[in-house]
Image (tube, helix red, strand yellow):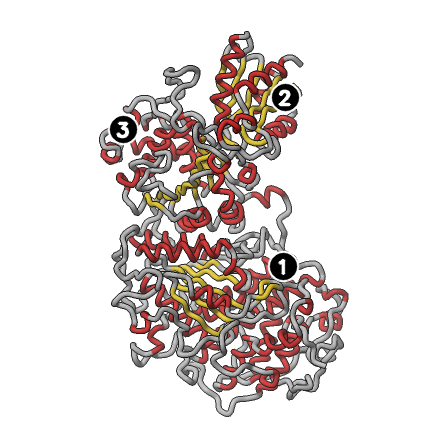
Amino acid sequence: MLSVVSTPQDLDDRFRAALTALGAPARRRDLGEPLPGGAPLTGAQALALFDAQLTSRLLDLAGRWLRSFGEGYYTIGSAGHEGNAAVAAALRPTDPALLHYRSGAFYCLRAAQASGAFPAGPEVPDAAGPAALIPDPRTPGDDGADADHSHDAGVPDPEAVSGTGAAGPDADPSDSAPASSGSGAEPSVPGAEPSAPGVGPSDLGVSPSGAAAGADVEIGSGEATSTGAPLVDGGAPGGSAEVEAASLPASAGVAVDAAGSATAGVPELPLPDPDDAHATAARDVLRGMVASAEEPIAGGRHKVFGRADLAVIPTTSTIASHLPRAVGMGLALERLRRNGRRADGDAAPWPPDAIVVCSFGDASVNHATATAAFNTAGWYDHTGLRIPVLFVCEDNGLGISVRSPEGWVAATLRAKPGIRYFAADGTDVAEAYRVAGEAAAWVRRHRRPAVLHLGTVRLMGHAGADAETAYRSPAEIAADVARDPLLATARRLVEAGYATGEELLARYDERGWQIRRLAEEVLDEPKLASPVDVVAELAPRRPVRISRAVADAGTRAAGPTAGARAEAFGGKLPELAGPLTLAQSINAALADGMLDHPGMAVFGEDVAAKGGVYGVTKGLRDRFGAARVFDTLLDETSILGLGLGAGVAGMLPVPEIQYLAYLHNAEDQIRGEAATMRFFSRGAFRNPMVVRVAGLAYQEGFGGHFHNDNSVAVLRDVPGLVIAVPARPDDAAPMLRTCLAAAEIDGAVSVFLEPIALYHTRDLYSDGDGEWLAEYAEPGAWAARHVPIGRARVYGVGSAEDLTIITFGNGVRMSLRAAATLADEGIGSRVVDLRWLAPLPVADIIREASATGRVLVVDETRRSGGVGEGVIAALVDGGYVGTARRVAGLDSFVPLGPAARQVLVSEEAITQGARTLLAR
């Protein structure tokens, strides 16, 4: 009896039976001829799409096979989503792509495109005809549409129509429609009426009783049949010839007879080249599955789709957390298209008319990050700012086991203002290719966002451990199997006369042998074998180069660019303005950074017109223009996503998060996206960024939890992230220069946490003493005053021999005041300002602690999960043998008004803590 579960064995058996039943066409057609019916594909192109699809399918089966004997570590596959090969074919290999985890066929086709192996399209007899909408995807360049290159950032586009996605006068007549399926019929996507009758079991070559038409085999029984044999001893490689043949799983896509020999056949179509682009792509994917250190993008750190030469940017997200980055990349592409240079002066990494494509599943439509990305793209489109992004929603109707309600995804995507809607049946490569081509051409021409809603199916469950029968009926599973996109492409090839079923089966078998051979080869490749190997690309630190970059910036500012600098500051250079506050010093350093880094952009809520809620960015927009200093919508996820995309594109983004408490709803953009990019791409991609965050507590007259947040534990837990906390004006500017240089040199991601309560502080010990102010260093002194990452600052008070106080942020000012009080009592203290919370200045901590043997850690964050825990741990790990004590904030949110004093560290608590420690 026919199995109702789409297991690897079952899916392979069904496909074989169906191919056998397809037989031969009535007449043969040359591969160079277009598909019948006006489809914008030749037979050769359709065959290339089939090759990408079958390679992806066989990789899924290989992943399950590898896992069966403990040598594979990833079984989420692309089965049922192979229609995304048509999306890849409709794009150019120079269009940057951020792909979700069911993108095997897209990846294989992109590899074929980049190698020049994807055939040329059909001749276009009439440029106004449907085929004219499909650009030649093989080479970059103008697609024949007169793209408008005249709209700068922040300047409303007269073509932009609020909330409609309608095009301007240069659009095709069909562009005025508010929503388009890309064809005259509704697409076959879940929740929509199909444009053609559904495919039933008989269309698979399977009779209602379950017997495969034209094949005398029993399918899904687990017994050895003419289509394959069960695995022996887990299917591990090795053994005698008989064992080797018997252990070859049907999931590897190779038919064997009882004697173990390959099925004979002399196909008229040439068999796949064992060393073609699809085989190379397959090797990449297999290496990821087995965690090979030779995998080309992540080097065994994770299974991702990515390769720099294919413009495929790795994304580890299982949801839509990469969509905000895609929007940021679209924004950056437009800026690079105008000036053609990156922050480092190199040429833009992609052609001027490139577009960004990002794919995701239907369940991800409901995720906050997807909502943020759609909203931001539509918001900017509404203002006239161009965002050339093609979102691709691959809709199989399920999020693991949770169903997308019928019609929900289509209704949701259609309702997104400012985003043009296209839809296609992803199981039909001709339709998917045509509609994807229309969508890509529309985005490329108008530089505006669109979404392609691609109907797909799910085969073999969510992943290897997924028991679909727990939440899907046999009828539902059978319906998806009946719409198998790989079989649909095979049927089209045979019906059109390009191949026989036997030839396609031979092609499937040959590629199966190739993938089996590749799988066995990658098993022997080395794995990451040491901690050093694993973290090598996490966050490289090149302090000498960073120091040199800071010095070079000072040389330029004092020499070749001195005139431009004087003009930018309106003749009032900050080093001549007298002592500055913390906020003024940061403002001046930002201006100097903008002058030295042409690709630097400052953006966030209220940073441009208002100059920031605390005036820290005041005047920057007037000096550097709205394209480089601009206000964003109120959404931290989108602000960080803009920065992530801009950084990957080669800019130097400096986004601002208005308050530390606002960061927490968007922190995964730093943890899961920013910090992982270099780690999971072996440095091939990076997203340099300096995130300015106003935070910490002690604001007078304005407070409550959201404006006095003292929680930084979530940041300190992010591997490789740099966390800077400047307390003094004369530290703020050099530390900011260091972070900017680290972003440029190492691709570092830094959080520049600015203590709000110290922004405008002027005095230290008494009113009017002005001792918290500091002069701004002239450019010639920048090298001498450089502050390396991970180095502390030490203040000596009195003899500085009795006590070491280790602190940061607001704690520096309070500790210096407390140390002065202790000095009056004859107690000498050294106050250590950590300055960097990650990496901690461990060497300085150990040295200064050992100098006195008594350490008081003053931590304005919370006692649990606070910075003080890390300092104490560093002392213990470093072999410190003296005494130590902590003064920290309570494990409480910061309340409003005077009640805040009950939970925060005070000068009195520091003084009392010191006395208690000294009395031991």
The image shows residue 636, relative to residue 579, as above or below, that is below
Front residue of this view, candidates 589 and 291: 589
The image shows residue 47, relative to residue 821, as above or below, that is below
Q: Distance between the residues labelled 1 and 3?
A: 58 Å
The image shows residue 153, relative to residue 168, as above or below, that is above
* Residue 447, quarter of picture: bottom left
Mark 1 or mark 3, whichever is nearer to me: 3
| Element marked by disc 3 | loop
Q: Earlier in the sequence, mark 2 or mark 1?
A: 1
Residue 573 is tagged as 3
Q: How far apart are marks 2 and 1 (CA)?
A: 47 Å
Q: What residue type is labelled 1?
A: Tyr
Whether residue 791 sits left or right of residue 292 in the image: it is left
Whether residue 616 sits left or right of residue 885 in the image: it is left
Front residue of this view, candidates 237 and 658: 658
Q: Is residue 555 visible in the rendered structure shown here?
A: yes
